[in-house]
Image (cartoon, grey):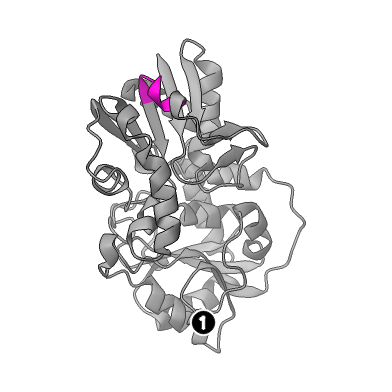
């Protein structure tokens, strides 16, 4: 079978974990390619190595299966980018339409906002009719595929550092849906309030409106570790599906950060093990931050339970292999 792995927007030259947010898909796929030589592999705008990624339309044209590793695809349709930049990117994708028709497409996604509807109706502008379309979501894996981040982060060599920051948040504003419709997500307002507090210290990283003071707008997770290792707590949000998990929970545990969650996050308690973790107000958050700073047993308990619930790194690769094989 001829399989093309494609990055539609950003050119990706993948060399190691924590360089890109989608490494939890890139790294398992690298293992899959190595362990399944019966297939013929090609790449579009993606390469395993420091250089070599190119937009090879023939790679898509000649493939039986096209795997789309979608990275924050929704931001192109929430009126958050300059129209010129969007059109430049979109024009390259339009070249692929004739080659994507009647193809088996597999979408790999780690965001509730990136799904079949977004890809077919917005990214492909209703101009592509695939033979079939399958989605592989991060939540299709035990404890969420983001569990791999725990292993990636704890395996990195880091300098020891003392914790001196009460709260850290790394991510982005999710206040808009497609077409700029308000999502109802509360995190922007919550993060603003936290930043204004005088009784706790905070560090914010990511893409935020100017009303939120950030230390860095966007940096690879590898570089974010220096800030995370110094922090005591964070707050996990979900913006579409409250039953789902997000990578922030796993990443927090890897840096000995206590993972508080906003209201109904992880509704079915896949990883959230104690009601103490749930936060419904800023005042409650501040009081609980003080408690986890004073009582280290809270983090120890949450971390122990977390490690009992997620697979090993090898276990994740085996799950990925089975899932992708079934999806081909």
> From this viewpoint, which residue is outermost toward the top?
38
Q: Is residue 63 magenta?
A: yes
> From this viewpoint, which residue is outermost toward the bottom?
198
Task: Mark yes or no: residue 143 visible.
Answer: no
Return the x and y of residue 22 as percentages of the image width and height: 50, 44
Q: Nearer the viewer, residue 321 or 129?
A: 129
Q: In the rendered image, which quarter is residue 30 located in? A: top right
How many discs mark residues in the rendered view?
1
Q: For numbered disc 1, what is the local secondary structure?
A: helix
Q: Is residue 324 magenta?
A: no
Q: Is residue 200 left or right of residue 263?
A: right
Answer above or below: position of 232 versus 268.
below
Q: Nearer the viewer, residue 299 or 152?
A: 152
Answer above or below: position of 211 versus 94.
below
Magenta span:
59-65
Q: Nearer the viewer, residue 174 or 144?
A: 174
Return the x and y of residue 219 as percentages of the image width and height: 61, 59
Answer above or below: position of 306 versus 44.
below
């Amino acid at each position: 079978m001829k399989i093309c792995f494609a990055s539609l927007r950003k050119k990706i030259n993948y060399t190691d974990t924590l360089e890109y947010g989608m490494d939890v898909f890139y790294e398992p796929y690298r293992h899959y390619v190595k362990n399944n030589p019966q297939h013929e592999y090609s790449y579009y705008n993606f390469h395993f190595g420091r250089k070599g990624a190119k937009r090879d339309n023939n790679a898509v044209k000649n493939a039986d299966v096209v795997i789309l590793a979608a990275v924050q695809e929704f931001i192109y349709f929430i009126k958050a980018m300059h129209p010129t930049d969007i059109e430049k990117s979109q024009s390259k994708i339009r070249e692929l339409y004739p080659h994507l028709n009647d193809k088996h497409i597999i979408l790999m996604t780690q965001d509730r906002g990136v799904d079949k509807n977004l890809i077919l109706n917005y990214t492909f502008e209703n101009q592509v009719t695939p033979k079939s379309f399958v989605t592989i979501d991060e939540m299709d894996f035990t404890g969420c595929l983001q569990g791999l981040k725990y292993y990636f982060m704890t395996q990195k060599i880091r300098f020891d550092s003392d914790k001196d920051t009460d709260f850290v948040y790394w991510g982005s504003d999710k206040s808009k849906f497609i077409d700029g419709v308000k999502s109802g997500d509360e995190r922007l307002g919550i993060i603003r309030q936290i930043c204004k507090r005088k009784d706790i210290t905070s560090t914010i990283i990511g893409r935020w409106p100017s009303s939120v003071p950030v230390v860095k707008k966007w940096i690879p997770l590898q570089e974010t570790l220096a800030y995370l290792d110094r922090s005591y707590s964070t707050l996990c949000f979900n913006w579409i599906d409250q039953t789902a998990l997000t990578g922030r929970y796993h990443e927090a545990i890897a840096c000995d950060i206590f993972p508080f969650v906003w209201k109904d996050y992880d509704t079915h308690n896949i990883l959230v093990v104690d009601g103490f973790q749930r936060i419904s107000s800023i005042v409650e958050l501040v009081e609980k931050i003080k408690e986890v700073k004073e009582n280290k047993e809270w983090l120890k308990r949450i971390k122990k339970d977390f490690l009992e619930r997620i697979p090993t790194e090898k276990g994740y690769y085996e799950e990925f292999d089975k899932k992708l094989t079934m999806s081909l």
